[in-house]
Amino acid sequence: MRAAGLEVADIFRQCGPAFRTEHTASLSRGQRRVMSAIEQCRTAALGGHVEQCDACGHQRIAYNSCRNRHCPKCQSLTRDQWLQDRQAELLPVEYFHVVFTVPQEVAAIAYQNKEVVYNILFQATAQTLRTIGADPKHLGAEIGFIAILHTWGQNLLHHPHLHCVVPGGGISPDGQRWVACRPGFFLPVRVLSRLFRRLFLELLQQAFDSGELHFFNSLEGLQDRLAFAKYIAPATQAEWVVYAKPPFGGPKQVLEYLGRYTHRVAISNNRLLEFNDNAVTFAWKDYRHESKNKTMRLDAHEFIRRFLLHVLPSGFQRIRSYGLLANRYRQVKIELCRKLLGAPVPVAAVDVPDQAFDYRDRYQRLTGLSLRDCPHCGKGQMVRIESFTTGVLPRGPPNKAS
């Protein structure tokens, strides 16, 4: 049974200081920032405000969020806004989910060269899908897709892979018709896998030749050209994992899926089961054994270490769009797709600048739930009566409702 209210932040607050001391030489600045953000999220350390019901006088403190993209508590509003923006772009066709994964040897290089190799993963994947999609032997059309980087497996170990969500078809070369996939089938995964492997390894070799790759610790020897070639050689012959899941049932299911995957972090709070004796127990699915539900118990320091494996470089874009959905041409291309499909234009939402809303307005607009209603009497509205800055407590504790 899950411990009520257990959060990643609890583990970081209790064990983070000792972890920093023990790993002071190996922690990056980015990892330290993530730890601090999660520890301080929704605490007095980030400031906040006091609200009071205008009917019954009930008071509550609302602490500010850290807004760090690695924080399990700070993704909901960002995710819902992103999904709302995508809703108008969905087409009335089958959608497919294609996953591209690199072998473990390459994953090890990726961990020491995150920005370079993750960018290669995006580039090779995009080139593969667009090339095979445009090939008349397969689809013969310009396709579009959203690619989402995940760097973890369910056990929190480093496992970089891309999830791609692709409409089942595309625009013909002359731009005059919609070319649909065969029902239930997108593109041959064996063909995708072979081209993906070749393109990725070519780009990786180019990065090595240009001095963009750096190696440390157990991989330090790979700075030598012959050692690098020998290390990579098995990956040139192995079958790289590319697989296509069954198509989604429709646009609604696409949005539900995207909602689960786009703004996910390495582990959500609801997977945490216990934290005691400096050990963390969490739920995971073993995909190598028929997706069986299992539990794993890790020393708290090992849990933190695994969590921090997935801190991305500052500013790195982990959700990218290509082809028909690329930012530059998206609106024009989507309009053309709808025309070719004979699909109605969706009713546009009222375009109100996001800056016009505070977080409560955005929350209600996106979820339909109100943060303004008094949780005590249900009749009054919660009104801000005091704000306090970072590290400063409110002047007095909230009064009990009368």
Image: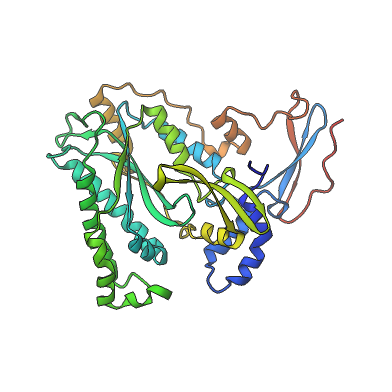
Q: Position of 48 compared to 145: left or right? A: right
Q: Quadrant of the C terminus?
A: top right
* Residue that appears at 39% across and 48% down: 288
Residue 175 in percent (x, y) is at: 18, 33
Q: Is residue 216 visible?
A: no
* Residue that appears at 41% across and 67% down: 112
Residue 72 in percent (x, y) is at: 57, 47
Decide which of 55, 6 is in the foreground and name it: 6
**Rendered image coloring scheme:** rainbow
Q: Position of 340 compared to 149: left or right? A: left
Q: Quadrant of the N terminus?
A: top right
* Residue that appears at 21% across and 34% down: 171
Q: Is residue 248 above or below residue 202?
A: above
Q: Is residue 386 above or below residue 29?
A: above
Q: Quadrant of residue 321?
A: top left
Residue 374 in percent (x, y) is at: 74, 29
How many numbered marks, from 0 up? 0
